[in-house]
Amino acid sequence: MAHWQLGAFEPAGGLYASADDLAGLARLALGAAPAVLTPASHAAAIADDPLPGHLGVGWLVGALGDDPMIGHSGSTSDYVASLVALPTRGLAAVVLTAGGDDRLPECVAVALLRAADDGAALDACAAAPLDDATAARTLIALDRVLALLAAPTVTDAALAATFAPTFLAAIPPDQLRVGLRTLADGAGACTRRAVIGAISGGVAATLGCANGEVAVTITVEPTPPHLITSISVQ
């Protein structure tokens, strides 16, 4: 079987790992290897840092009920992996799937943790409903993203009208322009947007583009002008 070649994205998807390999990483995430990662380093790695979004060192940081939760998901073509852990509970779940739904493995992993932690039923994996205000401001933010993707030139003023200052402080404008151009070139013309619901890490949404739908997770300031505080594209 031919191996895919990802070019500049090779660090993001060029490493092969088995479920056993990821289980070892899960044990590291739970602090079970102090000789590899000291307790102090482990605590720092899973703590939320000051950058936009909820990020540790290599981990997305959130919560499951009252318990801190860390995890990371990724996909390459039609293959998706998700690792989610509750360090204070000593629980972790690894889910590997084949298919185009990038969010499903994380949802399944979280459902497994709920079931292991408190016996919760393995309910269907779906985003939670959004209130009208959250949906409205998310659509406003997504309209600005569509405008940036369609613009021949993205100005500093346009970026400042779309992204929160904390976001722009962490991601230089030139780097953000490259990311927008890469997305526009790969997805084709994007003219539609839709919100799906609330998920861990923000609001799940899609952009309707010429080459197919693009899955997005986004958080937006609750007060006008509803600037984007974090956004990730799957």
Image (cartoon, rainbow, N blue to C red):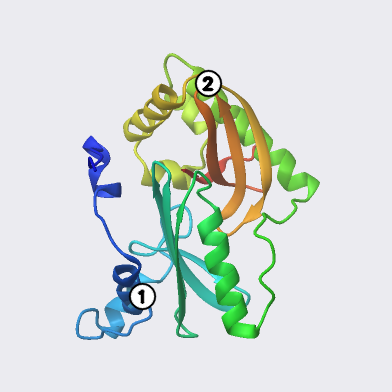
Could you tell me if the residues under marks 2 and 1 are in contact, i.e. CB atoms within 8 Å?
no
Frontmost of labels 2 and 1 is 2
- Between 73 and 78, the one lying in front of the other is 78
Image coordinates of residue 113 in percent, x first then y, are: 55, 75
Image x and y of residue 188, in percent? 47, 21
Q: Is residue 79 visible?
A: yes
Give the residue number, with chain letter if any, for mark 1: 29
Q: CA distance from mark 2 to mark 1?
A: 39 Å
* Residue in view at x 20 percent, y 80 percent: 36
Question: Mark 2: which secondary structure?
Answer: loop
Residue 120 % position (x, y): 68, 78
Indicate the secondary structure of the residue bearing disc 1.
helix
Residue at image location 34% in from the left, 79% down from the top:
27
Q: Residues within 10 Å of mark 2 (few under 14, many from 20)?
A: some
Q: Residues within 10 Å of mark 1 (few under 14, many from 20)?
A: many
Taking 209 as reference, is 116 above or below it? below
Indicate the amino acid at tag 1: Ala
Quick one: which residue is furthest to the right in this view? 132
Q: Identify the residue shown where x is 61% and y is 78%.
A: 115
Nearest the eye: 216 or 210: 210
Quarter of the image where the N terminus is located: top left
Task: Kindly identify which residue carries mark 2.
Answer: 210
Of marks 2 and 1, which one's residue comes earlier in the chain?
1
Residue type at tag 2? Ala
